[in-house]
Image (tube, helix red, strand yellow):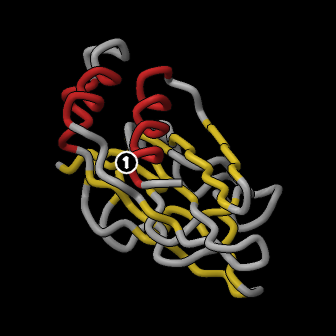
């Protein structure tokens, strides 16, 4: 599978708005998954038995504009969001325990050092904190979902 084939698949995902697409040709397998924003991630295993690197290509400006227009008038506002990204691979948890309330909810004011979530990696619980003061605008990951290094977790509108 060539880079041009992968670019065409990314464009297809961007244009149709589907959440996830997986294509396998021989030993090559590509999974393209959209998060709630316009970010697209591509998973390319080099061989069936090895772990897969994650490549996050830039979405062409025309594709980003096309997907942002039908959404809502808030689309231009998303350009000013600061995204909190996962510093590690692990499992995302929005609360300290299953019966505890989430650390933050959409609309909450956050300040630097405020715990936003926990990412469990190798049985270690890693608290992820806000780096900016702002309003939590979006939560991009569901509770107990696996996350990759660099995956956007939250969108914060700086104050």
How many badges with numbers are in the image? 1
Residue 158 vs 67, above or below: the answer is: below
Residue 19 quadrant: top right
Residue 86 image position (x, y, % from top left): 48, 68
Which one is in front, 116 or 142? Answer: 142
Q: Quadrant of the N terminus?
A: bottom right
Residue 155 image position (x, y, % from top left): 37, 48
Q: Residue at x 78, y 77 (%)?
A: 49
Crowding near the residue tagged with mark 1, few <14, some 14–19, many ≥20 C-alpha atoms within 10 Å: many
Q: Residue at x 57, y 59 (%)?
A: 43
Q: Secondary structure at mark 1?
A: strand
Residue 102 vs 117, above or below: the answer is: above
Name the side, left or right, on which 27 lies relative to 43: right
Residue 57 image position (x, y, % from top left): 35, 54
Q: Residue at x 42, y 22 (%)?
A: 15
Q: Residue at x 44, y 39 (%)?
A: 10
Which one is in front, 38 or 58? Answer: 58
Residue 21 vs 98, above or below: the answer is: above
Residue 145 image position (x, y, % from top left): 70, 56
Q: Badge 1 is on which residue? A: 155
Name the side, left or right, on which 108 lies relative to 64: right
**Furthest-right residue in view?**
99
Which one is in front, 70 or 75? Answer: 70
Name the side, left or right, on which 90 lies relative to 109: right
């Amino acid at each position: 599978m060539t880079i041009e084939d992968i670019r065409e698949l990314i464009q297809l995902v961007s244009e149709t708005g589907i959440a996830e697409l997986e294509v396998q040709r021989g030993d090559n397998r590509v999974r393209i998954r959209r998060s709630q924003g316009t970010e697209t991630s591509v998973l390319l295993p080099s061989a069936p038995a090895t772990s897969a690197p994650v490549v996050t290509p830039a979405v062409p400006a025309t594709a980003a504009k096309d997907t942002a227009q039908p959404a809502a008038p808030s689309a231009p506002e998303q350009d000013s969001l600061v995204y909190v990204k996962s510093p590690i691979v692990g499992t995302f948890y929005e609360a300290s325990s299953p019966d505890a309330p989430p650390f933050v909810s959409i609309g909450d004011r956050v300040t630097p050092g405020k715990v936003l979530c926990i990412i469990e990696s190798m049985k270690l619980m890693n608290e992820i904190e806000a780096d900016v003061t702002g309003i939590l605008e979006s939560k991009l990951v569901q509770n107990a979902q696996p996350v990759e290094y660099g995956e956007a977790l939250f969108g914060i509108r700086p104050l």
